[in-house]
Amino acid sequence: MRLLLATMIALPFAVPVAGHAADKIKVGMISTFSGTEAAYGEMETTGFNLGLKALGGKLGGLPVEIVTGDDENKTDTAIQQATKMVERDKVDVIVGPPATTSVLGVEKVTREAKVPFISGGPGPSVLAGKNCDPYFFSPGWQNDAVSEATGEYLAAKKVPNLYLMAPQIQAGRDMVAGVKRHYKGTVVAEKYTQMTQLDFAAEISEIEAANPAGLFIFFPAGQEGTFIQQWAQAGMTKKVPLYTMNALDQSTMPGLGDAVIGIPIGTAWAESIDTPTNQKFVTDYIAAYGKIPANHAAAAYNTTLLLDAAIRSINGKIEDKALFRRALETAQFTSVTGKPFKFGVNHMPVEDYYITIVKRTADGKPTMADATVILPDFVDFYAKDCKMATN
C-alpha cells in the first residue's frame, strides 16, 4: 500500500547545500500489522502520521510517499520486506519495525545497501557497541537502558533479592543485562522462556516457591499481558512485587485492569512527562485517535522530527546517501519529551530515562504516572566500544 502526502506549505531550508533537492522522499515503513503484536504497528503508524501532520504533510519540505509492509512479527518476513523495499521500491529510508529480532534482520539489508534505517523503538545491544552501523539510528531507546532504569530504581529501593525472567531472544538478554548492571541485591534466579510461550503456570509456581522480594519481567507486548494476567489469577500480585520496563505501556495496559496497578516501569518516554512539548503530543494524539499514546507512538513521532530536521539541513538532497546519513547524525530538533535531541557516537539516543508507576486516571484508565528521571542524559553502556565508520 502506498500513500502520497503533500501540502501547499513549503518549509524553509536551514543550511544551503549544493545540488538539487529530490522531488519527494520515499519512506519504507515496516511494522507489525497482524497477530498478537499488531498494537505495536498501530502505535507506530499513528505516531508517524501525527508527526507528519504536525509538519504540514512534508519532511524537510519534501512530499512523502510511504510504502508499508507487515513483518507479521517474523524476522524472515521483515528481511523480505526490507529487501523488496530496497531493491524494487527504491526507498530512501526505512522506518520501524517494533521488535528487536526484526530490527536485526532489517539492519543486515540496509547496512549492505547503505540505506538509512530508523528503528521503530529498539536499540539492540549488538548494534550499540563494536558492531555499530553508520546507517542505523534509534531515536527511541537503547534496549538495556530502559531496564537499567528499573535496576537503578530497585537499587534505590534496596530490594534485597530479585528473580529475573525474559524470553530467550536478544531483547530478553538485553533487558536482563540492563537490570543486573545497576541492581545491587542478590539475583535469586535468571529464567529464560520460549519466545512464543503463552502458558506460564510452571514458571509462576517456581517463582512462588522461591519467594523472592521482587520479580523483574520483560516480554513482547502480547506475552507481557498474558503473563501479568496469569500472575494476577494465581494470586501472586500481593505476594511478590512485579517490576518491568516499557513493554508494559498503552499498547498493553488497557485490557489488564487491576493487575497492572502499582507496577513500576523503566522507560525512555511516558505520557506523564510534564513538559509542554510532551503534553501537547499526548493531547493531540488523544484528540486524533481517542486513546493515550504508547512508547512506539512517541518514537515514531520523533522519527518524523528527525527526518524533517535532517532533510531540511541538506536542502532535500537525499540522493547523496552519505550526506543524508551525516545529516541524520547531526540533526537538531526538540524531542517529544521537550528536550533537545542528540545521538551518541553509536546512533543511540543520549536521553533521560524514567521510572513511572501505573495508576488510574480520573476516568479509571491505567496510565504511566509520576514520571521521574532516574538516569539523566544517559549514555548507554556500549557506546565506548563503537568506532563508527564514516563512509
Image (tube, rainbow, N blue to C red):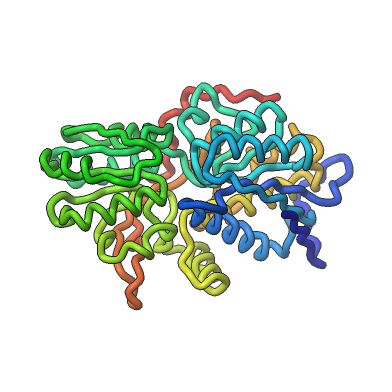
Q: Nearer the viewer, residue 85 or 77?
A: 77
Residue 158 seen by the camera:
no
Question: Is residue 41 left or right of 369 when viewed as pictured?
Answer: right
Q: Which quadrant would the N terminus be assigned to in this image?
A: bottom right
x and y percentages locating residue 84 in the rendered image: 72, 38
Instruction: Kindly identify the residue that appears in the image at 43 percent across and 32 percent down.
Output: 170
> Which residue appears farthest toward the right when viewing the image?
20
x and y percentages locating residue 327 in the rendered image: 69, 40
Residue 352 seen by the camera:
yes
Q: Nearer the viewer, residue 208 or 314?
A: 208
x and y percentages locating residue 351 in the rendered image: 46, 45
Question: Is residue 159 left or right of 304 when viewed as pictured?
Answer: left
Taking 356 as reference, is 196 above or below it? above
- Report which quarter residue 110 is drawn in: top right
Marks counted in the figure total 0
Instruction: Kindly identify the residue that appears in the image at 15 percent across and 56 percent down.
Output: 235
Q: Nearer the viewer, residue 111 or 381?
A: 111
Question: Is residue 19 left or right of 99 when viewed as pictured?
Answer: right
Taking 30 as reference, is 12 above or below it? below
Instruction: Kindly identify the residue that appears in the image at 58 percent across and 48 percent down.
Output: 31
x and y percentages locating residue 56 in the rendered image: 72, 65
Q: Which quadrant would the C terminus be assigned to in this image?
A: top right
- Report which quarter residue 148 is drawn in: top left
Instruction: Kindly identify the residue that appears in the image at 65 percent across and 33 percent down.
Output: 135
- Report which quarter residue 389 is drawn in: top right
